[in-house]
Image: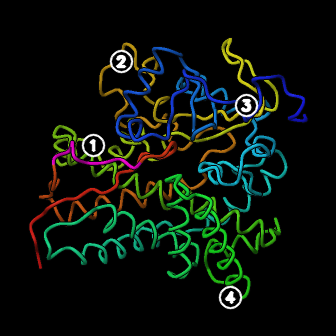
Amino acid sequence: MNPSNLEPGTGPATRSGPDRFPLYVPEFAADPHAAYQRMRETHGALVPVELSPGIPATLVIGYLQARRILNDPLRFPADPRVWQQQVPGSCPVRPMMEWRPNALRSGGGEHYRYRSANTASIDAVDQHELRALVENVADSAIATFRTAGRADLVSQYAFPIAFRVLSTLLGCPDEIGGRIADGMAAIFNATDADRGNHILGRGVADLVTLRRHQPADDITSRMMAHPAHLDDVEMAHQLVTLYGAGIEPLTNLIVNTCRKILTDEDFSAALHAAQFLVRDALDTVLYRDPPLANYCITYPPYPADVDGTLLPAHQPVVISMAACNNDPELTRGLPPDAVAGNRAHLAWSAGPHTCPARSHAYLIAETAISHLLDAFPQMDLAVPAGELRWRPGPFHRALESLPVVMPATR
């Protein structure tokens, strides 16, 4: 369909109206759950929002509606190429949404080709070796603040673990990995995202060149050797997806779970009394405050009817995993702890684009948090919980820092 033939009000460049909720403002980042409640009261399950100024979208905050959309790739494909024709490269959210030749932004045969190369390469990771790697990296991180008696769990613990573990799995030297992480952070923050996209692109291209000439036992080299025969451009974009899913969301999953343990006395007591496990704690956070709060974006090629609401063609449809997981319809009539140990949440997405590395992410986060709690059973927030600040951005749920204090040890 030619975008110039679209009916008025259905194109991707439709200007925002006064009833659109802005997802890019600090107020939304500070208390998104209050915003979801207001959205539900005024619009129901399908909410008109702005991802950045002048970029409209529909935010899906109903669990059942989200599952239908995620499992309907024909009506709701993930290909944004028509949408992005009218979105400038300087748009701060475009790098997180634009087309790339990878599984996340493809459908049909191309999706199968890209996803098969990814899953085969990821599934070859030895889980026992991965756990040992996380423990070693966690030990190294803890050694940097053990004697100080205080630390920022974002910059000194969770991020170093996510960064170093992923770089090792992908066979990426620290110098290249550092540039990739900087570019990815700028993209997630939606600040200077165009520059971040350029830095990211150069970094993954350098990694592809390195492993073409020096293959090793890592995910990157295995993808290159896969029967899908990915070329250098395709390889670079597979790595963009892996880094996008493997550094920021994993860092924030570790941090958000630590925050929950440090600020919720009942939650912490149940964990320390072994009434439930760290894995259960992770699932509670993935339900209540998932690190990738709003994503799983699709772009209907034709106006799509969902429960009587007509969603415009070629305008982003964004799934709010955070809001859908907390949909009151899910827990109506159930006890407050009904989600404990339940993994029906949408934090890993659903349908053909379900995260292929969720078992690895669970293992990394669980090992990192268990290692920290074993090392510092007496750990507290260094500031009142109300002083913690969330980074703005429409997609992630990410703290600026998580300062803690603990007894200093040798």
Please name the residue that numbered disc 2 is placed on: 334
Where does the magenta region start and end? 384-391
Please name the residue that numbered disc 1 is placed on: 276
Whole-angstrom CA distance, mark 2 to mark 3, is: 29 Å
Colour scheme employed for the rendering of this structure: rainbow
Q: Quadrant of the C terminus?
A: bottom left
- Please, is residue 135 above or below residue 87 in the view? below
- Which circle marks residue 72 in the picture? 3
User: What predominant SS class does the magenta segment belong to?
Assistant: loop
Which quadrant of the figure has residue 319?
top right
**Of callouts 4 and 3, which one flags the residue occurring earlier in the amino acid sequence?**
3
Q: Which amino acid is tagged 1?
A: Phe
Q: Which amino acid is tagged 2?
A: Leu
Please name the residue that numbered disc 4 is placed on: 214
Asked whether the residues under the numbered discs 4 and 2 touch, taking CB atoms below 8 Å apart as contact, a structural biologist would say no
Whole-angstrom CA distance, mark 1 to mark 2, is: 19 Å
Asked whether the residues under the numbered discs 1 and 2 touch, taking CB atoms below 8 Å apart as contact, a structural biologist would say no
